[in-house]
Image (spheres, grey):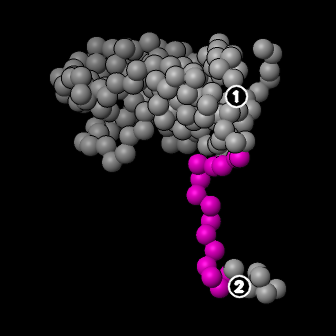
Amino acid sequence: MTRAHVDELDRSLVGYLQENGRMSLITLAEKLGVSHGTVRNRLDWLLTNGIVSIVAIVDPTSVGYPANVLMGIRADLKRMAAVEKELTKLEEVNSVAVTAGRYDFIMWATFTSDHHLQDFLINKFAKIKGIRYTESSHILSWGKRVWQWKIPMPRVAANGARGSNHPKPTRSKQQRRSTAVG
């Protein structure tokens, strides 16, 4: 299957899998109104092209990593690529984002304890050449934590009708009357 982009059917397939990653291909085919083979081929294409991954998502706190830290990092501009590469090698680091603004990088890392965090800072992080300044924020609690981004998409129902994940704006009776009269 040679395609250049993700289409509406792909988006709907991904959306259903984000709701339930264990949904069978047969069930997906029924929901999407297409054949089992179409779903299998589309999913294979999405996986092969790195558009989606099927993984188990683990809450670090529930498996012994309660210390979560967000860190803003400023680096020497000439060493940006090297700093990014070194940060991504650290096993405690979950994500590294190159940013514009106050920091050059925002990093999220998890630790088993404050002692583990301290050991990380002294024995690993401090050895990275090119870091000029850091500011750490120890996360006390999560108001909202989303483990994966949800693709905004229209839904393709088995009857071919298209819907959306986003609520439709509602109009008041007065707005409906003025539209009907005018």
Residue 111 shown in magenta: no
Counting residues from the N terminus, which is met first, the one under dot 1 or under dot 2? 1
Q: For the point 55% across and 42% down, which residue is it?
A: 101
Q: Position of residue 103 (x, y in %)?
A: 49, 37
Q: Quadrant of the C terminus?
A: bottom right
Q: Position of residue 148 (x, y in %)?
A: 48, 33
Local packing at callout 2 (Cα closer than 10 Å; few below 14, some 14-19, many 20+) is few
Question: Is any atom of residue 157 visible in this view?
Answer: yes
Which of labels 1 and 2 is toward the front?
1
Residue 164 shown in magenta: yes
Task: Identify the magenta region.
Answer: 161-175
Question: Is any atom of residue 78 visible in this view?
Answer: no
140 shown above or below 46: below
According to the picture, the residue beneath numbered tag 1 turns out to be: 34
Q: For the point 38% across and 40% down, which residue is it?
A: 145
Q: For the point 70% across and 46% down, which residue is it?
A: 162
Q: Is residue 2 left or right of residue 23?
A: right
Q: For the point 44% across and 12% down, which residue is it?
A: 89
Q: Quadrant of the N terminus?
A: top right
According to the picture, the residue beneath numbered tag 2 turns out to be: 177
Q: Nearer the viewer, residue 89 or 82?
A: 89
